[in-house]
Amino acid sequence: MTKQEEPQYEHGAIRPLAIMGMLGILGLTVIVLAFWFSPPMNWILWMIGIPLALIGIWLGITYVAVYHKVIRPDYIGLLGSTVTGFCDSLHGDEHILVVGCGSGHVAIGLAKLLTTGHVTGIDISEKVSQDTPTSPFENARIEGVKDQVKFQYGDPTEIPFEDATFDILTMDNVLHEIEEQDLKIQTLNEAYRVLKPGGRLVMLEWIRNRKMSTRLLFFAFVFKSLDYWNTLLAAFTDFQVDHPHLIKGPIDIVVYTMKKPD
């Protein structure tokens, strides 16, 4: 019997947490080895091993605890929730652009919800510029939607499409990775430009708060607070910004829906 092919989805955020988990195991090993040495070598090893083990194992446990709920991309599930109502609003003929498509999980999930529509994914990652077994191209083939999606290289600050091309544009944890404030605004401007009149931008971001800080420790500083996003988007007056939807979970997530005026 031939083993059924499985799509290979991944998310860049799992790597640092997984690495820290392995370093935690290394820290435990160093602690055990310290018992074989005499002072002051054993004290030096304990000073290295104990904090490494505590931090690494904590982040490793966090990785296991929240991976399937948060880090593994379940964007479609979030958008399909009764909180946002996004998936129920689709007619099936939309042209959708997924910015930061990665290995294609979101784009492929959206393609499955369409009938005559089409999904395009762009990313600055090499995953979208070469056809490898773990690429989004291969995942789309395995999932049976290869004719409904396409992927290509694309910088979110310079989206490589004409004005008014798409009905919907989605960004899943993209803006927080753009450090400069002016480039964040430029990305929003680009989203506005390529959307048709009446088109929607749907943006999802993890929220840095006490809950995230407790779970991710120093990795939490990569992300932004809810106040930050509210202030940034309130200043971007070209879009009509709906009230944000805050989804509670192991790590809180905010979903913004912004409409380009007709």
Image (tube, helix red, strand yellow):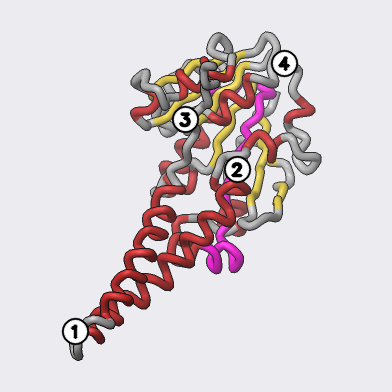
**SS at mark 3 in the image:** loop
Specify the segment rendered in magenta.
193-215
Tell me if label 3 and label 2 are in contact, CB under 8 Å.
Answer: no
Q: Is residue 239 visible?
A: yes
Quarter of the image with the N terminus is top right
Label ID, residue 103: 3
Label ID, residue 92: 4
Residue at label 2? 204
Residue type at mark 3 is Ser
Tell me if label 1 and label 4 are in contact, CB under 8 Å.
Answer: no
Q: Nearer the viewer, residue 48 or 123?
A: 48
Residue type at mark 4 is Gly
Q: Earlier in the sequence, mark 3 or mark 1?
A: 1
Residue type at mark 1 is Met
Q: Earlier in the sequence, mark 4 or mark 2?
A: 4
Q: Residue at x 46, y 19 (%)?
A: 138
Q: Is 19 placed left or right of 162 in the picture?
A: left
Which circle, 1 or 4, is nearer the viewer? Answer: 1
Compute the Cα span from label 3 to label 2: 17 Å
Residue 201 inside the magenta-drawn segment: yes
Q: Earlier in the sequence, mark 2 or mark 1?
A: 1
Q: Earlier in the sequence, mark 3 or mark 4?
A: 4
